[in-house]
Amino acid sequence: MNQALEGIKVLDLTRVLAGPYCTMVLADMGAEVIKVEEPGKGDDSRHFGPYVNGESAYFMSINRNKHSVTMNLKHELAKKEFLKLVAQVDVVTENFKPGTMEKLGLGYEELKKVNPRLIYAATSGFGHSGPYSKRPAYDGVVQAMGGIMSITGQKGGKPTRVGPSVGDIMAGLFTAIGILGAIRYRDQHGVGQKVDVAMLDCQVAVLENAISRYFVNGVSPKPEGNRHASIVPFEPFDTHDGEIMIAVGNDNIWKSFCAQIGRPELVDHELFSTNPLRSKNYDALRPVIAEAVAQKSTAQWQEIFDANGVPNGPINTIEMVVADPQVNHREMIVEVSHPVAEKVKIPGVPIKMSETQGTVRRAAPVLGADTAEILKRMNGLTDQEIEMLFSEGAV
Amino acid sequence: MNQALEGIKVLDLTRVLAGPYCTMVLADMGAEVIKVEEPGKGDDSRHFGPYVNGESAYFMSINRNKHSVTMNLKHELAKKEFLKLVAQVDVVTENFKPGTMEKLGLGYEELKKVNPRLIYAATSGFGHSGPYSKRPAYDGVVQAMGGIMSITGQKGGKPTRVGPSVGDIMAGLFTAIGILGAIRYRDQHGVGQKVDVAMLDCQVAVLENAISRYFVNGVSPKPEGNRHASIVPFEPFDTHDGEIMIAVGNDNIWKSFCAQIGRPELVDHELFSTNPLRSKNYDALRPVIAEAVAQKSTAQWQEIFDANGVPNGPINTIEMVVADPQVNHREMIVEVSHPVAEKVKIPGVPIKMSETQGTVRRAAPVLGADTAEILKRMNGLTDQEIEMLFSEGAV
């Protein structure tokens, strides 16, 4: 099948998560991503456990479909080859602390001279401007500063870090969007540009109604637990053997829900007949529902609610997620063959496209697997020249 | 300034959050987004509080830069005008339950006949295929089923819903990426396609190392609280007047950190000199650090740590986020003038582009503000014809 980004070449200096997540998304859609790594060491995340036959499972899950070239960018011979690659690619990505590329003499202003059509995408903690620009950041720091922790957590409890590194991942997704927008502009007008995405900015961008609520009420929202702020019932309830999330989004669903839990008299009850009433009389309603839901198992309720149009779902563990029939039908867990780790299961491609379905075409590369091939094919080097670069420690 | 997506036209049937978030991102980059809403009622989120002069702050924050056209898509006259618009746009977006557009006779297969270059993007709870496809979903249900709740929360505590609706927002961002990939392919090859993004799939795609840890160890990860799974110290500590997130990401930072908290003897201590040792002896180390950090205020520590390269950050409330100097320097809070709500503050554009900076050009539209203008400009209707459509209840 054709790929949406066929022909797009990305020279990728990113490490760990935000940047690699961005280039994974581009690679999944068919871009040729050439990951440039430090000789002998590589991306830091190659050294994050757990390991499979010595290969990092973490690294493998977000670097599939990429090529690996080692280059010591402090070495003049490597710089020369790097610039020859810059001249041939569409995109350069990096997620260093701002200023790092300039110190190497490889800042956007320099690279632009080599390739005016280049799109240069930088993902960083705080962005390439402003008072915090040069500060180091980690996902935890950005989640703390960006406000998401202050509105996540049990009611009355402490601010809570979101499990997955959404500080990194959101920034990776926004960077991918910026790159694709810049490609469109480049295709139309012939000029490249710099895309600068800050993890902190992205956290602000995803706070959604917390920001508008604050500006209207002047009060900072707090952790609300697992309950919806304004719809009732819309939260998990304990079942006979676990929990089930129930989302009664409107009065039609309410009618069906009451019938299914054997409490049809609640439908038109003067305290509960509309959502505003249910919200107002929440404390009276919750125990009534809780008592009914506790009578059956999660699986029984799922079957009943699914058959009667009541939005619901189990609170799945990771084990349950990866075994879920819908998740598997949608090919969201895929197995790839890795030369060292052998068979590895990783998340699939979430963007389903009728003409250009993205795929996991190859496993993550072992360090430097493609150095010789890329230098030969793209820079026209001979075997002897490549050998010299290796012996000089340039690659 | 030029805009990256200038000239791209999006006919937008989406409501509430996942779809509108996607088209907001496209509109911010310069696409012309024509929001099609039900006459008299509009997007459900127009009726979500809090309100400013009767206009929903929630709606206004994610529908800036868009146009609003009302159309009753069950009315034949409206359908005819809708199809005339379909023929002229690049993208149609919707986030109905799968099958809804087909019931209206406006499914992708029909629209494609009118415009073979069309990109049709559908965002839904479970996707347009698979056993759960036709089920209704809400953010809470998808967060429960997708596993993110099972790894978010205090250590030993309950699975916890992420405050912002990341089930919707992640799907919105992946849909935007899919649309932009499809536009690139259409520009190159002349054919459109259908993009199908499921909220559940996106939740799986962002679980990152939780999936790889599960497949390697066979054990589902649990909520880990605010502490990093493998780096120490990397968590919030109580200060004299609040909390501060500290992220000692490597041994150089450790050296500086110990000096700043007045405990230089910890640097080479036999129990704490390396990260593996600090992880192993966490229970002995934490109280020592906690005692030291409790001596000063959050602001004092910030100043000290910032001056000495120790990654740190306050756990900001929303009030603190919107007042933060970096957030404001990056223009992540912007004020727009709304015809009814007057001045409204909303999040800015997180993708910074050197040639085509996206902007908030106009406030969210009041319902149907652009119906007559669009029908005139794009479909060539006369004032009289438009008046007829209004009086027929078609628009």
Image (cartoon, coloured by chain):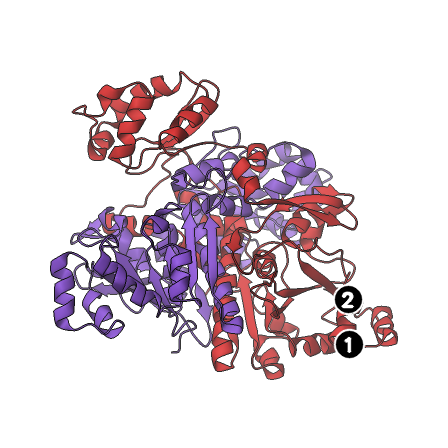
Chain colours: A red, B purple
Residue with the mark numbered 1: A77
Residue A148 visible from this viewpoint: no
Residue occupying the far bottom of the picture = A113
Instruction: Pinpoint the chain carrying mark 2.
Output: A
* Three-letter residue code for mark 1: Leu
Residue B133 relative to residue A74: left or right: left
Circle nearer the N terminus (2, 1)? 1
Q: Which of A60 and B294 is in front in this view?
A: A60
State whether residue A375 is above or below residue A312. below
Asked if labels 2 and 1 share a chain, the reply is yes
The quadrant of the image that shows the C terminus of chain A is bottom right
Pointer 2 local density, CA inside 10 Å: few below 14, some 14–19, many at least 20: many
Task: Provide the residue designation for mark 2.
Answer: A371
Q: Which amino acid does label 2 sit on?
A: Thr
Name the side, left or right, on which A81 lies relative to A87. Answer: right
Q: Nearer the viewer, residue A20 or A123?
A: A20
Horizontal and vertical percent for residue A314? 46, 30
